[in-house]
Amino acid sequence: MESRLKVPRLDLGKDDTAFKLLVSSHAAGKIIGRGGAEIAGMRRKFGVGCHIFGPENTFPPAGGGQVAVFFGTRAGIEQAFETIVAKILEAEEAWQDGQPVSVTAIMSSNSISSLIGVRGATIANLRRECGCSFNADPNGCMGEQLVMVTGPPERLPPALAALALFVERSGDSLDYAFQDYGASSAAWAPVA
């Protein structure tokens, strides 16, 4: 039986960027808010829409978590990162003040190549500039890979904003925005 992913009816005509995060189900609930209030607030305040896929469409190499897609202009998404990180922290019961936090982005292999740069120079510079660790997973699925960003909570929004620049420059984020991983979870393999 073939998987049939429910693709949301969204008009992405004026949106030029989609940024994907892997979040826990609890964080997904916090991002959505009661009756969708938090998502509606992000749309009003930042012009950013959000769709969170259910557990049937997880990114296979990650082994769990829900895919949250934020779409809008890059500037709007960057402004929303502070709110998004706050919601992720609110959901993480084990997190203690002063401890580093990890957030996982899903990016196209094209944007990952640019992020890493020649012999890792670009990602090394980003680590220094942002004060966060960036670790790109070599395993990919359907043209995408994971990037884990770890650092102090106040440094995560600017670090994610730095990633958003690479996502925008790749020009392919909307092509991957509503990828159906559930249909091909056995098809993932390391990216060469």
Image (cartoon, rainbow, N blue to C red):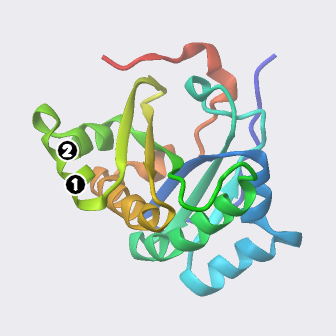
**Relative to residue 150, is residue 53 drawn left or right?**
right
75 vs 17: above or below: below
Q: Which mark is residue 124?
A: 2
Looking at this view, is 34 or 53 the one in front?
34
37 vs 69: above or below: below
Asked if labels 1 and 2 touch by Cβ distance under 8 angstroms, the answer is yes
Q: Which secondary structure lies at badge 2?
A: helix
Please name the residue shown 40% across and 75% down the image.
Answer: 75
The crowding category of the residue bearing disc 2, from other C-alpha atoms within 10 Å (few below 14, some 14 to 19, many at least 20), is some
Looking at this view, is 150 or 81 the one in front?
150
Please name the residue shown 35% across and 55% down the image.
Answer: 163
Residue type at mark 1? Arg
Question: Residue 191, can we see it?
Answer: yes
**Relative to residue 180, is residue 26 drawn left or right?**
right
20 vs 113: above or below: below
129 vs 80: above or below: above
Please name the residue shown 54% across and 54% down the image.
Answer: 99
Please name the residue shown 59% across and 29% down the image.
Answer: 62
* Quadrant in which the C terminus is drawn: top left
Residue type at mark 2? Ala
Q: Which mark is residue 136?
A: none
Residue 94 at x, y percent in the picture: 72, 48
Question: Residue 177, can we see it?
Answer: no
**Relative to residue 13, is residue 186 drawn left or right?**
right
Looking at this view, is 188 or 62 the one in front?
62
Residue 154 at x, y percent in the picture: 47, 68
Residue 142 at x, y percent in the picture: 48, 27
**Relative to residue 132, is residue 4 drawn left or right?**
right
Residue 45 at x, y percent in the picture: 60, 86
The crowding category of the residue bearing disc 1, from other C-alpha atoms within 10 Å (few below 14, some 14 to 19, many at least 20), is few
Q: Which mark is residue 128?
A: 1
